Amino acid sequence: MAKYKRILLKLSGEVLAGENGHGFDFDVITDICREIKAVADSGVEVGVVIGGGNFWRGRSSGSMDRVRADSIGMLGTVMNSIALADTLEQLGCKTKVYTATKMEPIAKYFDSHDARKELSKGKVTIFGGGTGSPFFSTDTTAALRAAEIEAEVIFKATNVDGVYDKDPNKFPDAVKFDVLTQTDLLNKGLTVMDAAAASLCRDNGIDIFVFNLTDPHNIVRAANGENIGTLVSSK
């Protein structure tokens, strides 16, 4: 039984590349999409924000102007959104892709009222193009879109099984948190999401649930409320 009515799933672009580290691994994308479809089929309304790191990251830009570099990154998120939508449609899941800047006929220009209508029809809505402005991360995009579509929670799918007091990949004595608040997140300087994203979630009453995407079925487990990660509460 699903715990939530409407969620925003935040995926990194890198996860779509699989072990290749770049571009698309459609076996990986299909595995993720099957789990997204299962959540949608259970009655949960699903929005998705994807990064663009499988194609471009700000650190790849060298001496390039930051605004232009971020524009390339935003285009990368649109490519990922289209790939995800196509895979979901092949699995029989209805979708709607929105972009933060006008890119018709590639995708529809984002409108929060329209997106909520599509969600209520059971379509997986995918938000590409970041916020439409440079200098903002896709974590901030996820927080912004979650507020605009009135999602209850952001599912932050990562390569670790929750939030730790320090990097568990570097420090074997790292301690995992089962629950903490977004104020704790900001005060402790924990790098789960950037400060702008965490503040947006706190101010709009949106929880963040951090879990490991190594097993894509964790998306379903998270939607069912299983304790497989860290809940960052807005309370």
Image: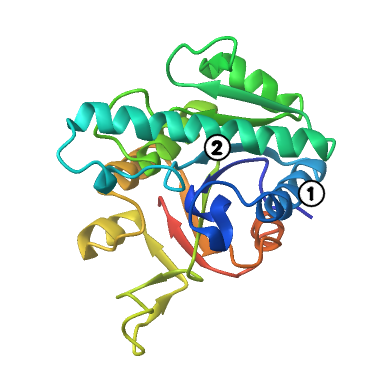
Query: Which mark is drawn over residue 119?
Result: none
Please tell me whether mark 1 or mark 2 is closer to you in this view: 2
Quadrant into which the N terminus falls: bottom right
Tell me which corner region of the image, top left, top right, bottom left or bottom right, holds residue 139: top left
Query: Which mark is drawn over residue 80?
Result: 2
Question: Residue 94 or 63: which is nearer the viewer?
Answer: 63
- Give the residue type that dot 2 points to: Asn
- Give the residue type that dot 1 points to: Ala
Question: Residue 71 or 186: which is nearer the viewer?
Answer: 71
Can residue 221 be seen by looking at this rendering?
Answer: yes
Question: Residue 34 or 69: which is nearer the viewer?
Answer: 69
Picture coordinates of residue 79, whole percent (x, y) = 53, 32
Residue at image x 46%, y 43%?
Answer: 206
Comes first in the chain, label 1 or label 2: 1
Q: Are marks 1 and 2 in contact (CB under 8 Å)?
A: no
Secondary structure of the residue carrying numbered label 2? helix
For the residues labelled 1 and 2, the Cα–Cα distance comes to 20 Å
Secondary structure of the residue carrying numbered label 1? helix
Mark 1 Cα-neighbour bin, 10 Å: few <14, some 14–19, many ≥20: some
Picture coordinates of residue 67, whole percent (x, y) = 22, 27
Q: Is residue 190 left or right of residue 17?
A: left
Query: Which mark is drawn over residue 38?
Result: 1
Which residue lies most toward the bottom here? 173
Tell me which corner region of the image, top left, top right, bottom left or bottom right, holds residue 80: top right
Q: Is residue 140 left or right of residue 155?
A: left
Which residue lies most toward the left here? 63
Residue at image x 29%, y 32%?
Answer: 70
State whether residue 131 is above or below residue 214: above
State whether residue 1 is above or below residue 86: below
